[in-house]
């Protein structure tokens, strides 16, 4: 089954509770955390994750676009994150591994993310420890960008490794995912689709979520 993770980056930040209620039929709430260093934008931090936690029973899928995430992963878990993903580009292999271990020690799901220019092989050192791998289909930093179809071979390669190893790891795509691009993602082997503008820009949000799920 395909899961939909609407990104609240496209929600109204003055009305997050209301806008999270609008996506109650989704599978995850995707929370984009940016520090102005790893990416050229600053968004949501630990206090906001904590404030959002009681507003929904959906799992919070927290995408950390921050330098050296190992410093903060435990605080995001304590704030109520259910899944925490860290960019492989954001620290040394040793520290990313330490971040995954800390997330698991908190009883939460852990994963790694790769930017468009990062090859599929970069996930291999972590794959056996991952509950989620996220392949970016835009440069991280902003919502509303164009989908990069040339990321599909990377998604297919990672799907092949997950299946070969019979791992339970989920495979997520993020950036420019819409009605026109969801089939390419699913055909390449993604099972979780993040969508910001495609969900929050829809007249009928529940219908759009259903359509994206396919
Ligand atoms: C970009 C974020 C995405 C973004 C997706 O850095 O990681 O989650 O919100 O937005 P859309 O779906 O509009 O491309
Ligand atoms: Zn994201």
Image (cartoon, rainbow, N blue to C red):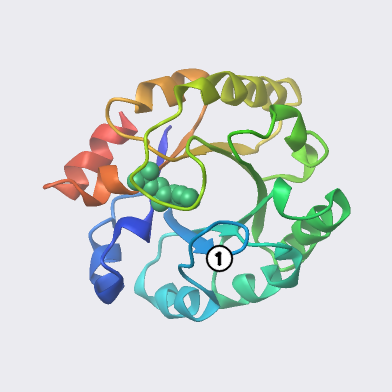
Which picture quadrant has residue 109? bottom right
Note whether 58 is above or below 143 in the view shown. below
Note whether 176 is above or below 71 in the view shown. above
Name the residue at 51% across, 29% down.
190
Which picture quadrant has residue 68? bottom right
Name the residue at 56% across, 62% down.
82
Name the residue at 37% across, 34% down.
146
Q: Is residue 134 left or right of residue 24?
A: right
Q: Is residue 35 left or right of residue 119?
A: left
Quadrant holding the C terminus: top left
Q: Is residue 97 left or right of residue 1?
A: right
Q: Secondary structure at mark 1?
A: loop
- How far across and down, in percent of the image, does residue 202 sit? 17, 46
Q: Which residue is mark 1?
A: 36
Between 30 and 58, the one nearer to me in the picture: 30
Q: Is residue 41 left or right of residue 90?
A: left
Asked if ligand 1 lies within 8 A of label 1, the reply is no
**Residues packed near mark 1 inside 10 Å, few (<14), some (14 to 19) or many (20 plus):** some
Note whether 149 is above or below 37 in the view shown. above
- How far across and down, in percent of the image, does residue 162 sit? 69, 28
- How far across and down, in percent of the image, does residue 143 sit? 37, 49
Residue ranking furthest to the left: 203
Name the residue at 42% across, 33% down.
2
- How far across and down, in percent of the image, does residue 208 sit? 21, 40
């Amino acid at each position: 089954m395909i899961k939909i993770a609407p990104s609240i980056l496209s929600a109204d930040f003055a009305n997050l509770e209301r806008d999270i209620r609008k996506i109650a039929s989704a599978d995850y709430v995707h929370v984009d955390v940016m520090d102005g260093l790893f990416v050229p934008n600053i968004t949501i931090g630990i206090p906001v994750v904590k404030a959002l936690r009681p507003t929904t029973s959906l799992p919070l899928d927290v995408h950390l676009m921050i330098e050296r995430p190992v410093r903060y992963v435990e605080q995001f878990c304590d704030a109520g994150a259910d899944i925490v993903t860290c960019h492989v580009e954001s620290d040394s292999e040793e520290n990313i591994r330490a971040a995954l271990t800390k997330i698991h020690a908190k009883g939460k799901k852990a994963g790694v993310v790769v930017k468009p220019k990062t090859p599929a092989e970069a996930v291999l050192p972590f794959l056996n420890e991952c509950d989620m791998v996220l392949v970016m289909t835009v440069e991280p930093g902003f919502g509303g960008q164009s989908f990069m179809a040339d990321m599909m071979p990377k998604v297919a390669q990672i799907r092949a490794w997950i299946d070969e190893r019979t791992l339970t790891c989920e495979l997520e795509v993020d950036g420019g995912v819409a009605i026109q691009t969801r089939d390419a993602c699913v055909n390449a082997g993604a099972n979780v689709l993040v969508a910001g503008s495609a969900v929050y820009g829809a007249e009928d949000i529940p219908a759009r979520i259903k359509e994206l799920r396919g």
